Image (tube, rainbow, N blue to C red):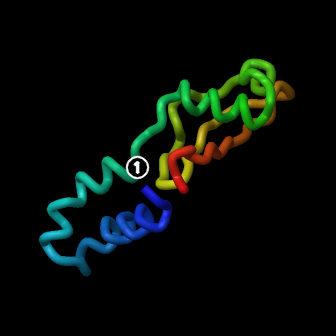
Amino acid sequence: MSSTASKHGKFALICFNFVSTHVCVHCPVISNIIFHQVPFSDVQRVVEADLGAPLASLYRNFESTPLACGSVAQVHGASLWDGTDVVVKVRLMKVK
């Protein structure tokens, strides 16, 4: 799914008062497609490939459950080795 298509789907979900009943009955299906959580193994692979090192060497702690999921990325809490808390945004690979 392209990011433009998912943005239109999100708009329809947010503005359900302004769209037809026909669209609203599909909102749960659209929501499941757009806001799905990527498996942590995929997140780990993407972060390690992008940063060139294992998560365990980059972060003291990296939360496997995302803080938020969106159509383009999901966000994970993490702690650096010096104790600084950070948020890591991981862009989904399927978005064109």
Residue 30 found in image quarter: bottom left
As drawn, the residue found furthest toward the bottom would be: 18
Q: Name the residue rendered at 23%, 53% in the picture.
A: 28
Q: Name the residue rendered at 48%, 52% in the picture.
A: 70
Could you classify mark 1 by the number of other residues whose Cα lies within 10 Å: few (under 14), some (14-19), or many (20 or more)?
some
Residue 79 picture location, percent across and down? 73, 30
Is 96 on the left or on the right of 7, as rendered?
right
Q: Name the residue rendered at 73%, 40% in the picture.
A: 86
**Residue denoted by label 1:** 35
Disc 1 on helix, strand or loop? loop
Q: Nearer the viewer, residue 95 or 62?
A: 95
Image position of 85 with respect to 35: above or below:
above
Image position of 57 with respect to 19: above or below:
above
Q: Name the residue rendered at 47%, 54% in the picture.
A: 71
Residue 23 picture location, percent across and down? 20, 69
Residue 64 found in image quarter: top right
Q: Quadrant of the N terminus?
A: bottom left
Mark 1 residue type: Phe
Residue 95 picture location, percent across and down? 52, 52
Is 44 on the left or on the right of 21, as rendered?
right
